[in-house]
Image (spheres, grey):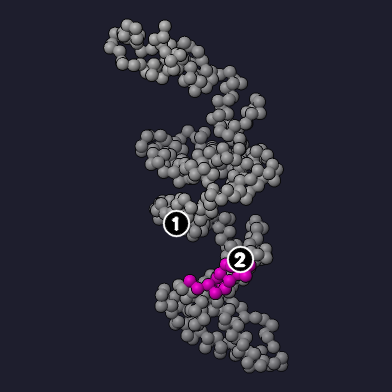
């Protein structure tokens, strides 16, 4: 007969210690069965059996790993631990083929397939398939970031986030495309890039049927249909999809700019803005478009570029409902409605709403006023003429100034 009250095992974060205690409980049950504990047996005899067993069980705690020096209470725990060094993963998932060093890890993994989520966050109600994932999630609420970069001081909630960040400093790109040789810092980036070669577009818009290679492209495209802009700037009225984007935008209105570029002297309100700017001088282009392989210095530049592929035009004219992919294009367009013409020709006084239109106009004056007169080979300023003027070189015969 089993004791109605099971042994209380104190929780510990050390995985090996947990395994040892669980084994002790299992072995104790076997010992009790060997002693044939009967229903009428006195409770103290079971307690004595338990205490005697545990004393013997824990007497030998000197089994040590020869590779890392870690100690264990039994040979089985050491054998399980050695798989960390040997890489052996004897427990395989029959659904996806993924392998694990411990049977308990496989059991926890199986919940991914079953959808079972036993561990729930008491702060936000989100559920997880493993206790470890819940523990990692809790850092979102506590703000704990135990992993710190020793080069720049930036902290992270997860160890693999720090490892991924370190590649910014080392420049390491361990993932290589076997078709074109392109290298990537992230495995996911390589997988996304492969679709450039395969042409696969697995992400489809349910409203218009358009497909995309990346999920982020689909999300950006969906804004065309939803127009869901939730976070407005109370200073200029500009709206943003995310609160983090609004927070960054608000620095535009800040007057204080304590961070200056040592190359050109330009100042910034945020240190991260300065860091992004410095990449322009160093010609560092870490952000690549997976549609056309074009590279950019900042994520925002890549994001603006991707609108060419997604068709997203988030900037809407308040006068005519016309939309644009860039805010600069919207500003130029709005001058049509305001009739503002800030760009004036200094030769004839004609004004234009767009600077590029002024530049086109200025070429007309260059055609009308050659550097010298070919028939007399004299220049208006009295200097010797060049063999052929710039304006003549660039003009077709029909517009040549010496045709008479």
Q: Residue furthest left?
A: 384
Image spot of residue 217 (x, y percent): 59, 44
* Magenta residue span: 87-102
Q: CA distance from mark 1 to mark 2?
A: 25 Å
Q: Residue furthest right?
A: 39
The residue located at (44%, 17%) in the rendering is: 396
Image spot of residue 402 (x, y percent): 39, 10
The residue located at (53%, 38%) in the rendering is: 305
Does residue 305 appear left or right of residue 125 in this picture?
A: left
Name the one closer to the observer, 87 or 11. Answer: 87
Dominant SS of magenta comes to loop
Residue 401's quadrant in the figure?
top left
Image spot of residue 135 (x, y percent): 57, 63
Residue 92 lies within the magenta run: yes
Of mark 1 and mark 2, the one earlier in the sequence is 2
Does residue 266 appear left or right of residue 338 in this picture?
A: left
Question: Residue 174's mark?
Answer: 1
Q: Secondary structure at mark 2?
A: loop
Can the viewer see residue 275? no
The residue located at (40%, 34%) in the rendering is: 266
Considering the image in quadrants, where does the C terminus appear?
A: top left
The residue located at (65%, 25%) in the rendering is: 319
Up the image or down, 332 lies above or below 290; here it is: above
Task: Mark 1: give few (<14), some (14-19) or many (20+) Cα within 10 Å.
Answer: few
Does residue 302 appear left or right of residue 205 in this picture?
A: left
Name the one closer to the observer, 131 or 58. Answer: 131
Residue 201 lies within the magenta run: no
Question: Residue 96's mark?
Answer: 2
Q: Secondary structure at mark 1?
A: loop
Name the one closer to the observer, 337 or 309. Answer: 309
């Amino acid at each position: 007969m089993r004791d109605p009250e099971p042994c209380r095992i104190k929780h510990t974060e050390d995985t090996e210690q947990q395994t040892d205690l669980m084994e002790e409980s299992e072995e104790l049950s076997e010992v009790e069965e060997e002693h044939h504990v009967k229903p009428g047996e006195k409770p103290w005899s079971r307690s004595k059996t338990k205490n005697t067993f545990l004393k013997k069980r824990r007497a030998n705690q000197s089994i040590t790993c020869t590779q890392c020096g870690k100690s264990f209470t039994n040979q089985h725990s050491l054998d399980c631990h050695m798989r960390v060094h040997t890489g052996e993963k004897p427990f395989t998932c029959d659904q996806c083929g993924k392998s694990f060093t411990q049977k308990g890890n496989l059991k926890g993994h199986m919940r991914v397939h079953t959808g079972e989520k036993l561990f729930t966050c008491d702060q936000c109600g989100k559920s997880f398939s493993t206790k470890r994932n819940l523990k990692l999630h809790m850092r979102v609420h506590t703000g704990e970031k135990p992993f710190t970069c020793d080069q720049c001081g930036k902290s992270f909630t997860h160890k693999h986030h720090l490892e991924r960040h370190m590649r910014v400093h080392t420049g390491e790109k361990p993932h290589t495309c076997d078709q074109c040789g392109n290298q990537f810092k992230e495995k996911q980036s390589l997988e996304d890039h492969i679709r450039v070669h395969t042409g696969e577009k697995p992400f489809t818009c349910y409203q218009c049927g358009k497909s995309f290679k990346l999920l982020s492209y689909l999300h950006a495209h969906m804004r065309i249909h939803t127009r869901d802009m939730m976070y407005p700037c109370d200073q200029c009225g500009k709206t943003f999809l995310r609160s983090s984007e609004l927070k960054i935008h608000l620095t535009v209105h800040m007057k204080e700019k304590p961070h200056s570029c040592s190359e050109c002297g330009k100042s910034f309100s945020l240190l991260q803005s300065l860091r992004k700017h410095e990449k322009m001088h160093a010609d560092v282009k870490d952000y690549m478009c997976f549609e056309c392989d074009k590279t950019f210095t900042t994520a925002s530049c890549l994001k603006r570029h991707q609108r060419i592929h997604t068709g997203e035009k988030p900037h809407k004219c308040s006068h005519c409902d016309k939309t644009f992919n860039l805010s600069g294009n919207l500003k130029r367009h709005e001058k049509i409605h305001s009739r503002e013409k800030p760009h004036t020709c200094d030769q004839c006084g004609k004004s234009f709403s767009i600077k590029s239109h002024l530049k086109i106009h200025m070429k007309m004056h260059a055609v009308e006023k050659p550097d010298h007169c070919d028939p007399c080979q004299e220049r208006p300023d009295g200097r010797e003429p060049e063999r052929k003027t710039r304006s003549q070189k660039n003009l077709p015969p029909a517009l040549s100034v010496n045709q008479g």
